[in-house]
Amino acid sequence: MSNELSTEGSAAVALLVREELARRRLSRQWLADQAKVSLSTIEKALAGSRPFTLATVVRLEDALGTSLRGARPSAEPAARTFAPDSMGAYARPAVQWLEGTYLTLRPSFSESGAVFAYLTSIAWDDAGGHLTFAEAARTDAEYEQKGFVSFPNLSGTIYLVTIFEGQYRVAILNRPVGRAAMSGILLTLAAGEGAQLTPAAVPLALLPTSARAESEVGVIRDGDRCYAEYRECVDRITQRGYARFPD
C-alpha cells in the first residue's frame, strides 16, 4: 500500500511547512539539507504537483521540530494568508509589522536641493493574499503609484512594485531595525525634454508616521520647517551606505 498522503493531507502539510518557513525566515534549501530530502521533492510537494509521503513528512517534522500531521486543509485561508512564491511566499503574521502609513522622502526631480514628500500606505490584500502599497498626498496626484510588495526570504529586501501596461517602477528598500526608516533606492521615470521620460534612480526613505507628531508633505525647500530633517534622512542613505550610487 502506498504511503503517500491524500491530496487534502498533502495540501494541509504544505500549508504548515510554508507557514513555518515564512515565520522563521528559513529557506527551502535549509529544510532540504536538515531533513535530508531533495530540494526538488520539497518544491514539487509544496507546489502540489506531487503528494508528500509519510516518510518525507516525518523527516520534515524532525527538521522543524513540530508536528505537521493532523492539520485540517483549508484552501481559502491559504490563499489569503500566504503571498505567491513570486513575491517571496511570506506569511501575513510574519509581515504584519510592515503594515501602516509611511512618510516617503526622495530628492525632488523638479527643484535642485529640494525634497519631495508624500505618504505611502502598506496593507494586506485579503483577496490577493499579499501586501499592497498605495501612495497619497502627492502634489502631482496623477502620478501616485500603487502595486504589490515583494519580500523574499533570501535577501530580506523589501520591493514595492508597480506594473501598469507593461511599465515597471520599483522601490528597493532595506529591512529596518525596529521602527526605524526603511531606506533604499527608487527606480522610476522622470520628466525629461518635452514629453520625454528619462530613467532615474534616487535615494528613498520611508518613515513610519506612527512615530511622528505630524508629517509635512509636498516639495520641501531650504528654509521650510521640516527641510533639515527631511534632507538629512535622504542624505544619510548614501552617507551610511544604505544604498550605493557608484561614480
Image (spheres, rainbow, N blue to C red):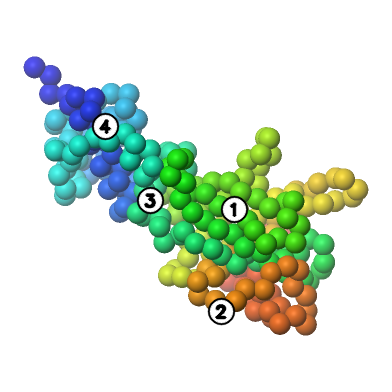
Vertical position of residue 141 compared to residue 45: above or below? below
Q: Which mark is residue 92?
A: 3
Residue that badge 2 annotates: 213
Mark 1: which amino acid? Ala
Q: CA distance from mark 4 to mark 2?
A: 46 Å
Mark 4: which amino acid? Ala
Q: Nearer the viewer, mark 3 or mark 2?
A: 2
Q: Is residue 193 left or right of residue 229?
A: right
Residue farthest toward the left in the current orientation of the protein:
1
Mark 2: which amino acid? Ala
- Contact between labelled residues 4 and 3, with CB atoms less than 8 Å apart: no
The residue shown at (43%, 70%) is 178
Q: Position of residue 177 (x, y in %)?
A: 44, 68
* Lower position in the chain sequence, tag 3 or tag 2: 3
Where residue 59 sits, quadrant-wise, is top left
Q: CA distance from mark 3 to mark 4?
A: 18 Å
Q: Nearer the viewer, mark 4 or mark 2?
A: 2
* Lower position in the chain sequence, tag 1 or tag 4: 4
* Lower position in the chain sequence, tag 4 or tag 2: 4
Residue 59 visible in the shown view: no
Q: Which mark is residue 11?
A: 4
Residue that badge 1 annotates: 134
The residue shown at (49%, 54%) is 123
Q: Position of residue 238 (x, y in %)?
A: 63, 68
Where residue 103 sits, quadrant-wise, is bottom right
- Contact between labelled residues 2 and 4, with CB atoms less than 8 Å apart: no
